[in-house]
Amino acid sequence: MPPSVILNVGQVYTPEIVVGETLILSVKITVLDHPLTTVTWMQQGNILSEVDERVTIRNTDMILATIGSVISTLQLNSVSIQDSGSFSFTANNAAGNNTLRFLVTVICKSLDTEFVNPSI
């Protein structure tokens, strides 16, 4: 049986985050029959890895994931407007895979601006 994920597969999740903040996406995977072999996080179709200094990926108990649960967390520091868009998570094992999709919106938080009348 493919790994099941504890979010609705097929549903697109739509988190919002402010420029400069840290994006954290977490997925809980339940492994029933076959060991979990890989998990993959992607942004705009490109595989994310810790080669990018802004990216941290943590997977709990991957070695022990023959039966039970694994939590995979993606952390992307200092998000920018260019980080808006699709992210996905895929869990694979010998029986197949499941993918979750996230549509992340990065917003600019407007700063209060004080206008001074130059004629005063």
Image (cartoon, rainbow, N blue to C red):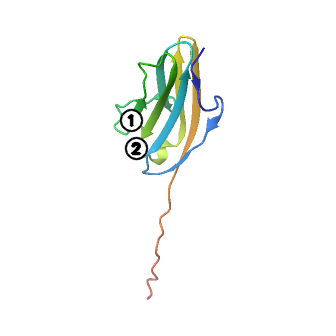
Residue lying at 43% horizontally and 83% vertically, measured from the top left: 118
Q: In the structure shown, which secondary structural element does the residue marked by tag 1 occupy?
A: strand
Give the label on residue 22, or none.
none
Q: In the structure shown, which secondary structural element does the residue marked by tag 2 occupy?
A: loop
Q: Does 112 appear above or below 87? A: below
Residue 60 at what x, y percent from top left? 43, 28
Q: Quadrant of residue 5?
A: top right
Q: How many marks?
A: 2
Circle nearer the N terminus (2, 1): 1
Q: Nearer the viewer, residue 99 or 37?
A: 37
Residue lying at 41% horizontally and 32% vertically, measured from the top left: 57
Q: Is residue 38 left or right of residue 52?
A: right
Residue 44 at what x, y percent from top left? 51, 33
Give the label on residue 77, or none.
2
What is the C-alpha distance between the residues marked 2 and 1?
8 Å
Visible in this render: residue 118? yes
Q: Nearer the viewer, residue 64 or 76?
A: 64
Q: Nearer the viewer, residue 95 or 84?
A: 95
Quarter of the picture containing the N terminus is top right
Quarter of the picture containing the C terminus is bottom left
Visible in this render: residue 44? no
Q: Residues within 10 Å of mark 2 (few under 14, many from 20)?
A: some
Residue 93 at what x, y percent from top left? 52, 15
Q: Does 30 appear above or below 34? A: below
Give the label on residue 56, or none.
1
Residue 27 at what x, y percent from top left? 53, 32
Which amino acid type corresponds to the residue marked 2 in the rendered image? Asn
Q: Does 4 appear above or below 84? A: above
Residue lying at 58% horizontally and 14% vertically, measured from the top left: 96
